[in-house]
Each structure stands twice: as C-alpha cells, then as structure tokens.
Amino acid sequence: MGAGRPALFAALPRRLGHGGLHDPGGTGRRGAPPRRRRDRPESAARALSARTLEDCGLTARPAGLFVNVLYIDPAAVPELAEAPKARAIMDGSGFRERLQAARAAELVDYRAVAELKRPVLEALFERFRQRHLGRESARGRAFDAFRSVCGPALRRHAVFEALAERFEPGGGEAGSGWPEEYRSPDSPAVAAFAERHAERIAFFEYLQWLADEQFAQAAGSARDGGLSVGLYRDLAISSAGHGAEAWGNRGLHARGASIGSPPDDFNLHGQDWGLPPLIPERLMESAYEPFIATLRWNMRHAGALRIDHVMGLMRLYWVPDGRSAEEGAYVHYPLYDLLGILALESRRNRCMVVGEDLGTVPGRGARRAGSGRGPVLPRALFRARGRRGLPGAGGLPRAGAGDGQHA
C-alpha cells in the first residue's frame, strides 16, 4: 500500500463503525449534495468520555472541556503516512472482519469501535513520539502549541485518563475506587505518577490534539460547503460524577445530591439524572473560571452552541441521594452574571447560542430575562403551541420551534 491510506479506507463513508470528526456526515465535502438547509447548523460529535464507552447519554458530559476521542478518524491523521505498523493493522484480515461486523450492526457498538481504533491510534502515537514529540518539526511544534493553548486543564485530563486506565474505578464518584493518594489531582502521589508515566499522558494529550485538529477541519469543510452557521455543538447540563472534570474540580461539585426535575405533566414522579450539581457559591468564588473555560472550549470551531436545559443558569432542581425526585428542591444560581458571561463569550468566539428551555419554568418572565442578550430559545413542537393550536414558538422573542431537542 505504500505511504497512502489503506485500501480499506478508499471508500469508507462511515469510517470505523460510526461517524467521525474529520467530516461528520459528509457535510462539507466539495461537490457533495446538500444534506441540510444552508441556514441550519450542523451538529457535530458530542463530548463523551474516552474511557466510559457505554456512557453515551444525552444529559451528561463526562469531560466538558474535551471531546470523545472515539470520533477520531485514523485515516485522516497525518502520521498514518509514516506509520507502517498502523497501516498493517488496518490492512489485516481480522481487522477487516471486525470492521464489517461493526458497520453491519443495527446500533453503534461503541466498545467494538473503540477496540478497532485503539491499537491504530496507539501505533500512530508511537510514530509521532519517535519522529516529532519534543522535536522542532512542524507536527511537534503544532502539538506543543495545542498544549500551550489548553494549559493545565489538558494535562489534568490526560493524567486522569492514565489513572483511570490503571485503576478502572467503574463508575461512581470520580476516583472513589482508587487508592486514597490518587483521589486529589494536586496530591504528591499524582505528581509522581505523572512523572513516571509521562509518555502515557502525552498519548492522551495527543488524542485530544488529533480530535481538535479534525474538529477544525470539519468546521472548515462546513463553511466551504455553504453552511452559513457551521458546526452546531451541544453543551450538557453537567459533567458526569466519574469523569475527569469532576475529579479535577472536586470542591466545585456538590456531594450527596444530583440534578433532576420535579414532577410535571410529562413525568409524574419527577426525574433524577444522577449528575453532580455545581455549588453556586464555589462557582462565584472561582470568578466563574470553570464556566468560562467550558464555554470557550465548546465554542471552539463551532458556529452555534446549544445549551441543554438553559434554565439551569437560573436554578437547578437538586435531589438528595437516597430520596425520590419528588423530595428535591430548587437551588438558585447567579443568572445575570452567567448570562453576561455567556453573551461576552458568544461575541468573542463569534458563536451563536441556542438554549433549550424545556422543563418547569417560573412564569414567562424567566424566559424573557435574557431576551435582549440571551440565547435563542428552541422549543419542542410537542410543547410549543401557537395560535389555533399550531406548533410555534409561543410568541416569545428570539425563539424557534423544532422537531427535536438533542443533537
């Protein structure tokens, strides 16, 4: 096969068993027929954990600052041209058989996809480490620049992934199943672990870099393909309690409670989503830095950002552990501070904000609170009613209706 792509990828529109970041859904391929209206944003891959392969729920973001590396397209990684080991893996008969099985599955088998991609990505990093890591090559400098842009958050994320790979906590609170000395990101034991496993941590940083590169390429393809908005990313209401974000910000999330919703006409017993809520006072004490960082990262390469349950900027329904959702209570958040930050970051990043307003809302005034500077509010058709009972935006300014809510 020489230095080109393996034959397997010559015409593989769905890549390795599911969609990829390099060109999601063929959105931006030059000459391809339009798959959506030009004025409608295209939804890109959701941010999921690189470790918890079955955690594909629509509500939680296991790592809010980074993306699920499962969406990387190995065939689009520049190192493939100089990595014979990676090409040999993909050209192997066993690999081909497992790929065909993954592609033929009715539903995406995330674990099968991960098992296909992981050895290829390992081989790609091995070649990158040999030729570029810590060197003055173009790829080496680009990787160093990405590390610099991300700052300490990227290293914390990579350290967490390396620790999780070793200790396999298997869910629950982040790090709760690990030895005590590894449960805090600032402990001497964690620092020593990071020093001993520097190459493994660099591997997880490398994966995030590849994902970011391919997000940028997809965004460029979307613009070139005529999509006026571009990629439409999705920000969940909270991060999963077993993920890197919760581990890296242990004092920021409440323990002993989770986010949910009270009883309503659509769910008579309420809901418990099993996600740790942010503590409002801790968020204010941090000068909102975690909120700002999350917005900036998720607006990166995006033309629009959808915020799940946007009324969570005002209040969240907390459910005590061991109690039913009917026994929860609302906790209020600094709405106008958060709206101001949201508006500022939207302008700085040239990214439209779309806020999902499903849920129990205290009167129409709450929806109008940020109407002058707040997000566009999409409403689900089954809940939105205009005149004569037809679906509509309910007469709200800066609102629209759609047939779905989650990307």
Image (spheres, rainbow, N blue to C red):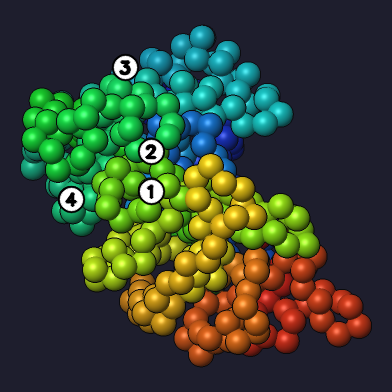
Sequence order check: which comes first, mark 1 or mark 2?
2
Query: In the rendering, at what x and y percent does residue 237 appear?
Result: 49, 58
Callout 2 environment at 10 Å: few (<14), some (14 to 19), or many (20+)?
Answer: some
Sequence order check: which comes first, mark 3 or mark 4?
3
What whole-number distance in Å separates the C-alpha atoms at marks 2 and 4?
22 Å
Residue 152 numbered mark, or none: 4
Query: In the rendering, at what x and y percent does residue 9 appear?
Result: 51, 29
The residue carrying mark 1 is 255
The structure residue drawn at horizontal position 87% and vertical position 77%, both measured from the top left corner, is 390
Give the residue type that dot 4 points to: Pro
Task: Name which quarter of the figure residue 43 lies in.
Answer: bottom right
The residue carrying mark 3 is 85
Query: Which numbered disc, 1 or 3, marks the residue closer to the eye?
Result: 1
Q: Secondary structure at mark 4?
A: helix
Give the residue type that dot 1 points to: Arg
What whole-number distance in Å separates the C-alpha atoms at marks 1 and 4?
25 Å
In the rendered image, the quadrant that contains the N terminus is top left
Answer yes or no: do the residues labelled 1 and 4 have beta carbons within 8 Å?
A: no
Query: Which numbered disc, 2 or 3, marks the residue closer to the eye?
Result: 2
In the image, taking residue 286 as reference, residue 334 lies left or right, namely: right
What whole-number distance in Å separates the C-alpha atoms at marks 3 and 4?
32 Å
Answer yes or no: do the residues labelled 2 and 4 have beta carbons within 8 Å?
A: no
Callout 3 environment at 10 Å: few (<14), some (14 to 19), or many (20+)?
Answer: some
Query: Which numbered disc, 1 or 4, marks the residue closer to the eye?
Result: 1
What whole-number distance in Å separates the C-alpha atoms at marks 1 and 2?
9 Å
Callout 1 environment at 10 Å: few (<14), some (14 to 19), or many (20+)?
Answer: some
Task: Identify the residue at the far right of this view.
Answer: 388
Query: Which numbered disc, 3 or 4, marks the residue closer to the eye?
Result: 4
